[in-house]
Structure formats: structure tokens, C-alpha cells
Amino acid sequence: MIDTHSHIFSEEFKEDLPEVIARAKEIGVEKIFMPNIDDTSVEDMLSVCQAYPDYCFPMIGFHPTSVEGPDAIYKVKEMKKRLVEGHPYIAIGEVGLDLYWDKTWLKEQQQILDEQIQWALEWKLPLVIHCREAFPELFQVLEPYKHTELTGVFHSFTGTVDEVRELMDYSRFMVGINGVVTFKKSTLPEALKEVPLSKLVLETDSPYLAPVPFRGKRNETSYVKRVAVKLAELYGMEIGEVERQTTENALKVFKIRKEVFKVS
């Protein structure tokens, strides 16, 4: 298995990161992909990747909730300077739109998302998209790129059947599924009837969105197994097939060769 979205470089893991990594390996997680948050988190993320080479892999991006005014674009443009020949980043992320708490900076969020789409196209990297209460606004930004080489993951999808149908129009993208799928009142199982397993990747979004029975507690990568088990139930498949297929999907969208990552 691959956890395609985990913030284990955050403060919540400062005290027990080695144990968190050990538990992940024990249940069969072979790689962890880590999306950046903003300009303040890059160094912590890279430090974890250096401590666990060939296991933890970084992305570079600016999260929409970190857009707190028109000056954010300057931070983003400064961040772009990290994209140089030989850089370690496997994707542009975490990027996107978030209107859950505040719509004040929608224009700036859209501008910054578009800027980072350009990075993804220029460097031929997948885009890892966060979207919360903002699908119409997200599609406004993405529409001009529908028929380009843009690829990526719609991370932590929790939307409706209609929204997932629209996502499926972006054929080069995968859908990231995490602990939300295990929640009792989640509508995700219904929406997933529209999505073949060949379009899904596993994720945790640690330390957030822990699956049942850990809901409300700190999430961690080892809990991704609970997501795989739930998907096996929903798709009527053996757990091993879900693990195999989602790993293949992750390798495909992140453009990673099996022999490089030694993933079985």
C-alpha cells in the first residue's frame, strides 16, 4: 500500500514519529507521499524525507487556507524557486480552493491555484488538489486545462454523486479516499458507485480524518488499512486486490516506476 497524502511532518508527530513509521511498515505501507502546506512547512517536510529516504517523498505547494491576503502570491512565487533541476518533489501539492470558513480570498485562491497549475505543466508533475465547499469555483479554474496533459489527484473527496461525475471528466486524475469513507453518515459510499477502483488511491490526510474506530483522534499512516478494508467491502473484492490496484494507481499518477520504488 501507498499512503498518498500524509502530513506526518507536522507538530502532532514530533514526539513519536519513529513509532508511527514502524507501525505503518508493519501493516504493509511501502511508501508515504507528503504534501506541503505552505512556505513555513517545507523544511520540516524535507527533514522527515531525509530521515526516511526511499520511504517518505515530498511535494511542493501552497494550501488554500494559507492564502490570507493578496500578498500570498509573493510567497508562492518565492516557493517556486525551489523547483530547480534535480529537485526532490514528486508532485505539486497541496493546492486548491477552500471556502468552508471564509470566502474573502476566493479570487486570490484561484489565482494561486492557476499559478501552481502552471508549475505542474512546466515540470510535468501531478497536481494534488484540495477542494472544500468550492467545486463550482474549482471547475472554473480547471476547465481550460481539461484537455491538456495535466494529471493529479482530487484529494480527500467527500462530494456528491453529481460532483464525482464531473470529476470523472478529468480522465488523467485519480480520486483520493481516506477515513471519511468509514464514517457512519458519509455519503461517499454512494458516490463511489460512479467510480471504478482503477481511479482510486488510498490516503490518510494524517493527522486529520482518522477512520472509525479512531475518529476524533490523531490519524496516522497505519490507519490507511482501515480505508482499504472499507473499499474492499464496498467493491466486493479481496483486500489484497484493493491494495494491489490502488498501489498501481498511485504509481501511475505519480509517474513512478516500480523498479525504482521496489513496490511489490
Image: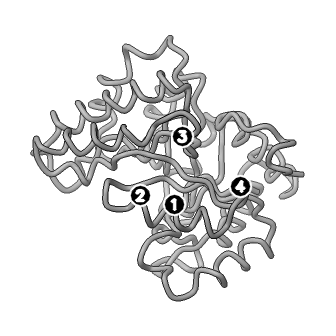
The residue type indicated by label 3 comes to Ala
Task: Mark yes or no: residue 115 visible.
Answer: yes
Q: Earlier in the sequence, mark 1 or mark 4?
A: 4
Seen at 31% across and 24% down, the residue is 141
Figure quadrant of residue 25: bottom right
Residue 91 - label? 3
Residue 150 x %, y %:
51, 22
Q: In this view of the protein, which residue sits in the foreground, 144 or 227?
A: 144
Answer above or below: position of 129 versus 241.
Answer: above
Q: CA distance from mark 1 to mark 4?
A: 19 Å
Q: Earlier in the sequence, mark 3 or mark 4?
A: 4
Seen at 64% across and 79% down, the residue is 20
Seen at 67% across and 67% down, the residue is 52
Residue 176 x %, y %:
57, 47
Q: In this view of the protein, which residue sits in the foreground, 116 or 103?
A: 116
Q: In this view of the protein, which residue sits in the foreground, 238 or 31?
A: 31
Seen at 15% across and 33% down, the residue is 107
* Mark 1 and mark 2 residues within 8 Å of each other at the beta carbon: yes
Give SS at disc 2. helix
Answer above or below: position of 156 versus 115.
Answer: below
For label 4, the residue is 2
Q: In this view of the protein, which residue sits in the foreground, 3 or 8?
A: 8
For label 1, the residue is 46
